[in-house]
Image (cartoon, helix red, strand yellow):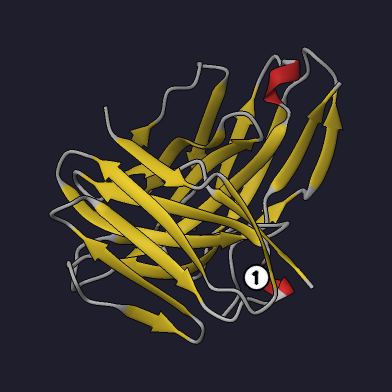
Amino acid sequence: EDKVVQSPLSLVVHEGDTVTLNCSYEVTNFRSLLWYKQEKKAPTFLFMLTSSGIEKKSGRLSSILDKKELFSILNITATQTGDSAVYLCVILSGSARQLTFGSGTQLTVLP
Amino acid sequence: KAGVTQTPRYLIKTRGQQVTLSCSPISGHRSVSWYQQTPGQGLQFLFEYFSETQRNKGNFPGRFSGRQFSNSRSEMNVSTLELGDSALYLCASSYRDLSSGANVLTFGAGSRLTVL
């Protein structure tokens, strides 16, 4: 059975801190890994990673995938209160139509 | 470009009733998938439709059903509602990233169902 494990489950930091969120997986026929940010409403797309070792960056957020060790990290530098959200890791596998979601990491950034 | 539109945004039902939720995908997206999100179970996949056909299905009972129309709009129906069906129901439309072959999902705002 495919499995996606995110850690930590929750995290509380202060503005300006740097955080690293982890996602490890065990899936058959991995295709890609996606990160989403979910505030009160729908998840919004952050990154899609398909190749090992290539860092994706968007402002203060960056992510990288290690397909040998089967994990990805999402880094957020200089955190702001607006970064408070649940960060979801999603694995696409098989025919790229099989989706496995992690439980999410609840990030709270205090002023 | 309009995003994924879900209606209604909020609804309250009682046990035993049935409910129909609607999802309009991003223009040009032909795949629509549905998810249930609860605090205890996280985000769980319900089913996926493509060109009016159910292409993939999660582990939910037969009370949960869906369909897709020729304009790619999709509906999800839950019959004989139970208290445990209270959740946020998310719809996502997707396109295929040609370089990786992977589907990238764009979610709607969700329909929050409360069953009393």
- The count of marks equals 1
Q: Residue at x 72, y 29 (%)?
A: B19
Q: Nearer the viewer, residue B2 or A53?
A: A53
Q: Is label 1 in a helix, a strand or a loop?
A: helix
Q: Position of residue B52 (x, y in %)?
A: 40, 45
Residue pointed to by mark 1: A83
Within 10 Å of disc 1 (Cα), the crowding (few <14, some 14-19, many 20+) is some
Q: Position of residue A77 (x, y in %)?
A: 53, 79
Whether A19 is drawn above or below B35: the answer is below
What is the three-letter code of the residue carrying label 1? Asp
Q: Is residue A101 among the parts visible in the rendering?
A: no
Quadrant in the rendering for residue A27:
top left
Left or right of A28? Residue B26 is right
Q: Residue at x 49, y 70 (%)?
A: B27
Q: Nearer the viewer, residue B111 or A30?
A: A30
Left or right of B96? Residue A40 is right
- Check the residue under mark 1 and report the chain it is in: A
Q: Is residue A94 among the parts visible in the rendering?
A: yes
Left or right of A98? Residue A21 is right
Q: Position of residue A67 (x, y in %)?
A: 17, 57
Q: Nearer the viewer, residue B43 or B22?
A: B43
Q: Residue at x 22, y 76 (%)?
A: A54
Q: Position of residue B38 (x, y in %)?
A: 65, 34
Q: Nearer the viewer, residue A2 or B11?
A: A2
Q: Residue at x 18, y 73 (%)?
A: B99
Whether B104 is drawn above or below A86: the answer is below
Locate the C terminus of chain A and report the quarter of the image it occupies: bottom right
Whether B65 is drawn above or below A52: the answer is above
